[in-house]
Each structure stands twice: as C-alpha cells, then as structure tokens.
Image: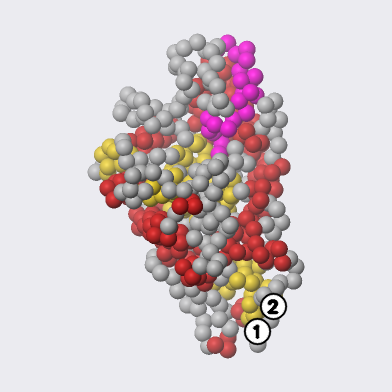
Amino acid sequence: MKKLFVLLLVTGLSLQAMAQLNFKKGKPDDDNYRYLDDYLALKEYIDRDKYPNFKLGVGTDVQNFIKTNSRVQWLVSLNFDETVAGNEMKMSSCVDGNGNMNFTTVKSYVNTATKKGLYVYGHTLAWHSQQPKSWLLKLLNGCTTKQEMHDTLVYAMDKWIKGMMNACAGKVKAWDLVNEAISGGGNDGSGNYTLQHSSAYSPSGNPDATWDVGGENFYWQDYMGDLDYVRQACRLARKYGPEDIKLFINDYNLEGTWDLTTKNGITASNKLWSLINWIKKWEKDGVTKIDGIGTQMHISFYKNATAQSNLKNAITAMFKAMVKSGKLVRVSELDMGYKDANGKDVQVSQMTETQHKDMAKFYEWIIKQYLAIVPPAQQWGICQWCATDNNTNGGWRANTPVGIWDANFYRKHVYAGFVRGLNGGEPTPTAIQAPETNQTTAKPQTVYSLSGQRLTATSPNELPAGIYIIGGRKVVVK
C-alpha cells in the first residue's frame, strides 16, 4: 500500500533552496498571518471546469526566474499558469543601436517556463517606448518621402518580429501586439481620443523632419500612419507566429473615472470607448484581426468612500464594455497601492493591518467581478504585475504595497483576497489523503513533479512512487 509522507528534507534540494520556499507562509512571528500557512498555491483555487480558459498570470523578474531552482522560479511555477516578462521581450532589450538582435535571454526564459508547464504571454511587439531609437533613426536617415519612411520601417518591423517569433519557436501563443496606443486626449473627428504621437509630429508636415524629440521614445505611427503601423504589426505577427496566435491591444486607464462617457447603456471611460473604436478602424481592411483587449489596471484602494465607489463603478462598466466589444478580455498588469482619506499614497512601511485587509477585499471584489461579468468564452485571465512589494525608492511604484507577497516573499493578506476571489469565498484547503483514512477528494487534485510538471490524480494510488509537490508541500509517495 502506498503511503504519503511530508518531507522535511528532500534529496537533491539544498537547505538554501528549502529556505527560499518561505513564499508558502505568512509573515513569521505574527499570529495575524498564521491562517495563510495552510492555503494551497493560488492557481489551485481556479475552477477549471467552470472557467476552462482562465489563466492566472504574473509579471516576472526574468533574470531571477531563469536561475536553476531560484525562489522566483518556484514561486511562479507553483502559483501561476502564465508568466509575462517585465522587460526582456521588449524591443530595446533584444535589439541594439545598430540593429543587432540577441534573443539568448528570451530563448532561455521561454524554454524554462514551458518546461515548468507555464504559458508565456509575450510583451510587447509594437510600442513607442523602450525602442532601439538610434537604429531606427539611422534607417530613416536619407529618406526623402513619407513612402520611403514607411517602407523602411516595415523592413525594420519585419526583421524584429520575425526574429522574436523564431526565438520563441511557436511556444508563445499570445502577445500584446500594440501597447499603449491611445493618447487619452484629442478628438479623431468622431469624439474618440487620438493615438499617441511625438510632440513634434505633424501629419502634413515636413517628411524629412525628425519628429521624435528627446528621450527613448520612437512613435512608429509618426512615420507609418495611425492605421498601417498596427496593420503591419498584425500581418507580420500572424506571418511569423504560430497559427493559433492571439493578438491583444493593451492599454492603461481604461477604468478611469474622470472621462466617463455613456454608450450602449454603459458609462465607461472614453479612453476605453476610443480604443474599441480604433480596433474597428484597424480591422476595417477586412484582413487585420485583433483577438483581445488588455486592461492594465495600475490602481489604488481609496479610503475615501466616494472615490472608491466611483472606481468600482468604473471597473464594472469597463468589464461590461470590453465584453460588449466581442473581444477576449484580459486584465494584463494588475497592481494596487493604497490612498488614505486625503488621497495620499501610503508607503509600505506605514501600512496597517486594516489597510492590508482593505486591499485584500478589493482584490477579491475585482476577481469576482471579472468572473461574474466576463463569459467563460471571452475570458483570458488576470495577470498580477508585481509578485512582491517594492520597498525601494526606485523602480515601478516605489515604496508601494503592490505585491501579493511582501518584499521578503511572505504571504500578505492580499494572498487571501486572491484566494477568496478565485474560490468564490473562504477556502477549505484540501490535499490528497492517504488511502487508510478512507477519504478521497471529490475532484482531481493538481500535483507537480519536482521539475514543475503538472500532474492530476484523485488518489495517491494513481501516482508512481516518488516525490511531488501537493498543495504547496513536498510529499513522498511510497
């Protein structure tokens, strides 16, 4: 008869590696967090029968993820379905100022993630920021007409997208095709916002002008046009990518409360309505096909009740409008700070237990809203942009409690908020029971090999003898 034993030490794993698994626990030496110790990994709470397409993703520190048995690698592979590179798949990370392309890190990341049973979501193909601007401007040097500029950049875009798709070898099935295209202002003639452009851009201006002024930004649409730069990117992604590739338009402030506009009985941000309208424009050629919309949702919990209510109403309306578009719906870069009653950001070190729990309840509400409003056929999933808090004075949302784990990789109350949102309420942690207890689970349990491969079993009798990860714990089956 096979028996299960919880391992205190696993052959092949160093004591250092064991110590890195503190992400399975709440804050040490604090009884307020002990309830978190018994929770399963986050993705174990997703009802796969009810939401078969839903993926729980996370923005990933690639350099640490690709290190063998790193804490980041374990945390991501055990808790999430999908991983997204923070920077390593952006153009400037792969293409230098002379147009030389290096996809070594991309290949390592994609191969490591897929071996761990993770989906990789590509971020991003066409963006105005983090571009190899010097190379692109060199290519344009000497072009005398707008057509020459356009054709030259089609060549550059072709080289870039082909190189990236070849590096991914068909393993990356979904991409942010275009990132942050909508300006959030202006009027395209139909009441929708215009696209972003450089400050010196003039559609009817001198074709020899260097429209990009200062900084790292390079606006493809300045030279290729508002319609064709997206259409070309879409054409090339489908040409070089896998046959079943899915392409998204990703943008921020789609849940904005300051520019609400009512259409089709839904009062949502005009930036969202504008994005939906631009997708219709891009697809009007009958060839271009956009599969989904990604909403970033870099938000905050507001202690001010009115501000919080307005934000929740806008989020609900956003999901409804996205569903109405007929596109796949993805929360692409979710993270959250905390604003006090005066609208001031609360730093990580100043957060109270009550404030942490406020954030947990808000995450729970957001996840439940998504699952309730977005039909399963239109669900892609939710990607938490920050796994851990940022306690530094620099980087993304510095000194802000943006993580599910704290900076020391311990579970926060937000972890419980995610669990309640995914689970539909308070969880009842379960694990595979030994046969002699005469207990079995009603549903198959997700089990992982030590290499991160996902397995499924309703009883340990279905597992060969070996070492497994079950419910976030190392278990040996004999």
Q: Earlier in the sequence, mark 2 or mark 1?
A: 1
Amino acid, disc 2: Ala
Q: CA distance from mark 2 to mark 1?
A: 8 Å
Query: Looking at the image, do the residues carrying marks 2 and 1 touch, with CB atoms under 8 Å apart?
Result: yes
Image quarter where the C terminus lies is bottom right
Q: Is residue 382 left or right of residue 65?
A: left
Q: Secondary structure at mark 2?
A: loop
**At 50% across and 78% down in the image, what residue appears?**
441
Q: Which labelled disc corresponds to residue 465?
A: 2
Callout 2: few (<14), some (14-19), or many (20+) C-alpha neighbours within 10 Å?
some
Quarter of the image where one finds residue 238: top right
Query: What amino acid is at disc 1?
Result: Lys
Q: Quadrant of residue 409?
A: bottom right
Residue at 66%, 76% (x, y): give it.
7
**Magenta segment range?**
124-145
Residue 161 image position (x, y, % from top left): 61, 35
Query: In the drawing, what numbered circle is on residue 435?
Result: none
Look at 50% across and 36% down and name the residue there: 178
Residue 414, compared with residue 1, is above or below; it is: above
Extreme residue toward the front, this view: 350
**221, 170: nearer the viewer:** 221
Q: Which residue is tagged 1?
A: 2
Of residue 353 and residue 437, the one placed in the foreground of this image is: 353
Q: Is residue 141 magenta?
A: yes
Residue at x 56% of width, y 25% of height = 215
Q: Measured along the vertical axis of the image, is residue 151 above or below residue 266?
A: above
